[in-house]
Amino acid sequence: MSVQDDLDTEIELIASSLLPAENLESSPSGIWPRTIGITSTDSDLSLHASISEGYPSKDAIGVEVKSPSMGRDEASRWQALVKDKMEEWKEEEDYPLYQLLTTHFLSILAPSTSSPSTQSPTKSGRPEAPQDSPSKPHHCLLISHHLLSSTKRKDLISLSSKLSLIGFSKTGHPGIMYSIGREEDLEEWIREVKSWNWLALRIRISPETIAEEKQDLLNDESKGKEKGARGGKGRGDWTELEKINEALDWLRTRGEGREKILIDAGVGGGRLEV
């Protein structure tokens, strides 16, 4: 895929991560510089990004926060905040523009976001959103014959962000999808994923509790949570993996023996049946 095609995919992902009050407009594909603007009916602030030839280099990215009522001093403070957030740019990761905007900038459009004059330059100023009563973390595991479609891969990232899920998808043969989150979110995730066109999709683990997972830790891992994204649940943290060994290692980092769920399903230690 060309850089422009990759950028189109990222812009689609960003658009699918927006809240109902938010809207994204983009300049035509294939023409540099590429510009996008994100507005919200809940805020006077708007986000604007300019992507030049040379992307994904950080030097090719420009981000601005604008408002029709913004004065010079306030504009300078927003510029300082943007400069600070741009230090998080990681061109080597998948979908870097999507990661940057959804993790560090979209929360600026929250209706209660104030001028950065009364906040440190690393905070969005959004007060902490009320949270639901704590629920025990759950997990689930889906395995398909393969996961190759770029559309499905993109939709998995978007859906995990929408539902604040932490997990991974292993591309290729077989396709593996493992997610951690709230029970009701996982149930919705399964319903949505099952509605896509799959070859031999199997639910290996229906949503069940994970005793060793701590809800507080999951909250800390969810991107954008500290800024109130997704009602305080954050936008999740979804990873794409290419090898079964990477999937096993990812599970090991979650808890001793967790990789056994894949081995028991015939992945990484035996014949897979789908």
Image (cartoon, grey):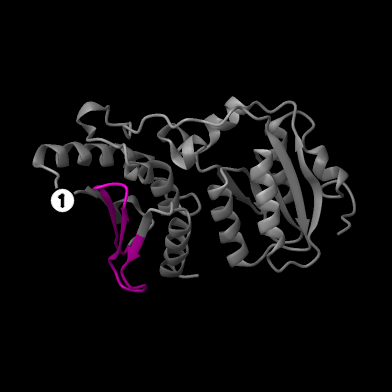
Q: Residue at x 37, y 30 (%)?
A: 127
Choose between 119 and 127: the one closer to the eye.
127
Q: Does residue 109 belong to the magenta stretch?
A: no
Choose between 260 and 121: the one closer to the eye.
121
Task: Write the start and end of the magenta stretch as one range.
Answer: 24-53
Q: Residues within 10 Å of mark 1 (few under 14, many from 20)?
A: few
Judging from the image, what secondary structure is the residue with disc 1 in?
loop
Q: Does residue 31 belong to the magenta stretch?
A: yes
- In the image, is 162 to the left or to the right of 53? right
Q: Using the rendered image of the protein, determine whether residue 113 is visible from the camera's viewpoint.
A: yes
Where is residue 198 shown, x and y percent of the image?
A: 74, 66
- In the image, is 73 to the left or to the right of 100? left
Q: How many marks?
A: 1
Where is residue 177 shown, x and y percent of the image?
A: 70, 51
- In the image, is 6 to the left or to the right of 66? right
Q: Residue at x 27, y 66 (%)?
A: 33
Q: Residue beneath label 1, please?
A: 68
- In the image, is 255 to the left or to the right of 156? right
Location of the C terminus by quadrant is bottom right
Which residue extends farthest left?
72
The image shows residue 53, relative to residue 110, as above or below, that is: below
Choose between 87 and 226: the one closer to the eye.
226
Where is residue 257 shown, x and y percent of the image?
A: 80, 31
Q: Residue at x 27, y 42 (%)?
A: 82
Q: Residue at x 66, y 54 (%)?
A: 242
Amino acid type of disc 1?
A: Pro
Where is residue 191 shown, x and y percent of the image?
A: 70, 56
Q: Using the rendered image of the protein, determine whether residue 62 is visible from the camera's viewpoint.
A: no
